[in-house]
Image (spheres, rainbow, N blue to C red):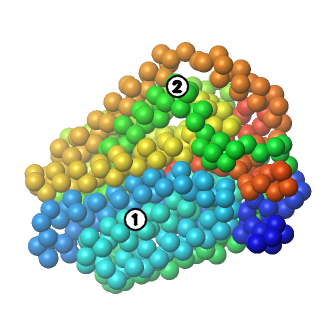
Amino acid sequence: MTGASMSEVEAAAGGPASTPAAAAPPDGGARAWMVLAASFLCNGLLFGIINTYGVIYVYLLMDLEKAKVPDAASKASLVGSLCIGTTFLVSPVAGVLTDRWGIRLTTAVGGLLASSGMLLSSFVAQNVYALYATYGVLFGVGASLTYTPSLVVLGHYFKRYLGVANGLVAAGSSVFSVLLPYPLEWLLKRLGLSGSLLLLAAMLSLIIGCSFLFKPLAAPAAGPARSARAELFNVDIWQRRKYVIWALAIPTALFGYFVPYVHMVKYVSTRFEGEDGKILILFIGLASGVGRLVFGRIADIPRVDRILLQQISFFCIGVATMLLTVTDSFAVMKVLALIMGLFDGCFISLLGPIAFQLCGQRGATQAIGCLLGLCSVPLTIGPFVAGLLFDHLGSYQLPFLLAGVPPVVCSVLMFAVRCVPDDAKEEASENGLMVKSCSPLEPVGDKLNGHHHGHGALRAGVGVGVQQASGGAASDKLLSNLDS
């Protein structure tokens, strides 16, 4: 294929060669707001479904128990935890593919895989082992490939208001987490598990349509290209001791992080007869959205100690999770759910700014991708172990108590970041970069005529987007998700 035809293909896909000229983020306008709305919808659909798996879990568990499947709770919970784990595990790969394929093509492929995974799940809803592959892995891979570019594209259309844009998009998962539980319950009662999954697959297909709006703006041409290995894998971030400690501490918290999302509805049914556990998921999602907007804005304030804020958020999440096991009041459960959601939003919104603070502009992208990859293992194991304990104990008291311990431990471990002195060489290098960089850093692109034509924004990962030379950090995640 000739160079000209390759450029045409990349342009059609929204890839590196989409436009040869530089274009500054417009920070508004009809197209920018359409892109933000599409990104909001993508994040909302993906993480709304992931976060409300607890509703699906109850019906899947009932089907497995009717079929007399042994260890039904742990097997049913593994479907949801595999999904969130895969979403995080594939994040580093999703970033590389976004750089290589382009924003539009990566999003479209992600939407196709996510909707296909859910569609196939509707045909194998009675086979939990098949659901591991379709719902857990295929949907999870699609979610990851959609999530990263849906945040990257914001850096092409917003600069001054990028933190606000990231906060609004991240709030999409919270809005959908609030809106989905009751309609999903209604569908499950009337259509059953298979019919409900089929409708969710149709909803996820909307992501493919959203991808056509994700046309990137080009960045200025850069100097001579670095080696492909240097572009793909930034090993410098692992020489930053503060980042290494932080990146290893965060996954410690997540062994218990996703347990309430999977098991809360079932836990309430076993503890508070006649009460509706879905309202707690709704409260968590609502408070998380508020937390992301509020703390995302706070993270942009100079001199704010972001690491301390994140430590506080983990401590509060852990304590609130443990308190769920000792209260006999459902009203108190609602308050605890609001606290968990608020500090969940704090934790998520600070991931991007902290990664930028510890690794700088050039390293923040892969710093986030690697962190999400490390988080995949505890996110997968935690809900599965909680389900296994319920199978053998018949109670959620111990699983929820144990789920609150890892976040508290993480909040203590993060003090080690303060015990490590800054590396003078790294500081000098980063300061040099900040002086030279008065425009957004160019992401990885294909080498054309000895130069790079990038997407126009640093890959956001968890909302790190374009940064100004003044060093202001833009907010948000997960992810989800996450997140979330």
Horizontal side of 416 relative to 302 (left or right) equals left
Q: Which residue is tagged 1?
A: 137
Is label 1 in a helix, a strand or a loop? helix
Which residue is nearer to you in this view: 435 or 303?
435
Q: Quadrant of residue 70?
A: bottom left
Horizontal side of 84 relative to 171 (left or right) equals left
Q: Position of residue 204 (x, y in %)?
A: 52, 73
Which residue is nearer to you in this view: 229 or 263?
229
Instruction: Name which residue lies at 26% across and 70% down.
Output: 129
Q: Position of residue 398 (x, y in %)?
A: 17, 44
Comes first in the chain, label 1 or label 2:
1
Question: Mark 2: which amino acid?
Answer: Lys
Q: Is residue 119 placed above or below 352 in the rendered structure? A: below
Instruction: Name which residue lies at 43% across and 43% down.
Output: 374
Q: Position of residue 182 (x, y in %)?
A: 39, 69
Q: Position of residue 152 (x, y in %)?
A: 66, 54
The Cα–Cα distance between marks 1 and 2, rounded to whole angstroms, is: 32 Å
Q: Is residue 410 placed above or below 352 in the rendered structure? A: above
Instruction: Name which residue lies at 22% across and 63% down.
Output: 75
Horizontal side of 210 relative to 445 (left or right) equals left
Q: Which residue is tagged 2?
A: 242
